Amino acid sequence: MSSSVPPSASKQFINRETLASNAVQKLVRARGDDRTLLSDDDLLASRRRLIPDDYKGDLWVFAYGSLLWNPVIDISAEKMGRIYGYHRRFCLKTEVGRGSPGDPGLVLGLDHGGSCTGMALKIGSDNPVHELDLLWRREMLNSSYQPRMVRFFGDHDHQPAEQGFPVISFVMNRDHHSYITDIDMETKARMIATASGFAGPCRDYLIETHKALAALNITDHYINTLYKAMLKYS
């Protein structure tokens, strides 16, 4: 199906080909930041702990950041709504994909507390587990996230509000060495404005996220404030 992904997403370095060929993992190793890099066997074991190979039924993934504008996986349906218990925050330092050791950037994570509005993406492939394995190579590359099933509540669902349905979400691993909690908004804005890595400038990550949320009429005051602050350094 056609999704809400902007045309610019097609130019992203993180795509089906680079994930399937292990190009991303190779670049991380080449830059020497493989301290927590997961092997293919580790990634497979992680996915199987949440979704076994013989899983039957629909599979939905929660998109709140880059998955909104560069989902990579095959999508057959989308629903607007929210999850509870987590919020969208730039809390993951990156020294490879969107930054470097001397000039690290920041990317989004689902941190504890509050709620988060986004999109539930239904995997539409005849082989949904294969799509998940691609997604695991993208999201679980260095164990900075923890895959979990959380309940998603659609804005226009006719089911009881307290029910919702399960979606796969990648929440922040607070024990990871790249998790940050004590950086003020101006410092975050400067880091995002100046950093760049093999996946591109960090500022583009924030710009595309800001554009995707605006296109979906999702108001996120935190993202809007950070975006405006970042523009001052660009």
Image (cartoon, rainbow, N blue to C red):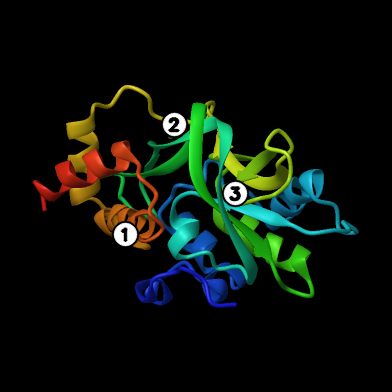
Q: Which quadrant does the N terminus fall into?
A: bottom right
Q: Depth check: 138 or 206 in front?
A: 206
Residue drawn at x 50%, y 63% is 24
Query: Element at badge 1?
Result: helix
The answer to whether residue 121 shows anywhere in this view is yes
Q: Nearer the viewer, mark 3 or mark 1?
A: 1
Residue at the outermost front position: 158
Q: CA distance from mark 3 to mark 2?
A: 14 Å
| Quadrant in which residue 217 is drawn | bottom left
Q: Quadrant of residue 56?
A: bottom right
For the residue labelled by badge 3, is the local secondary structure a helix, a strand or a loop?
Answer: loop
Position of residue 134 in the picture relative to residue 226 (left or right) = right
Residue on which disc 1 sits: 211
Three-letter residue code for mark 3: Met
Q: Is residue 9 above or below residue 94?
A: below
Residue topped by disc 3: 140
Is residue 141 visible in the rendered image? The answer is no
Using the image, tell me which numbered label, if any, was put on residue 44.
none
- Horizontally, residue 209 falls left or right of residue 43, namely left
Judging by the rendered image, the residue that carries numbered circle 2 is 179
Q: Which numbered disc flags the more N-terminal residue, 3 or 2?
A: 3
Dot 2 alpha-carbon crowd within 10 angstroms: few under 14, some 14 to 19, many 20 or more: many
- Which of these two is toward me, 108 or 4? 4
Q: Position of residue 148 (x, y in %)?
A: 68, 39
Q: Residue at x 79, y 59 (%)?
A: 58
Type of amino acid under label 2: Tyr
The residue shown at (46%, 68%) is 4
| Residue 108 percent coordinates (x, y) | 42, 43
Mark 1 to mark 2 CA distance (whole Å): 25 Å
Left or right, residue 76 beside residue 97: right
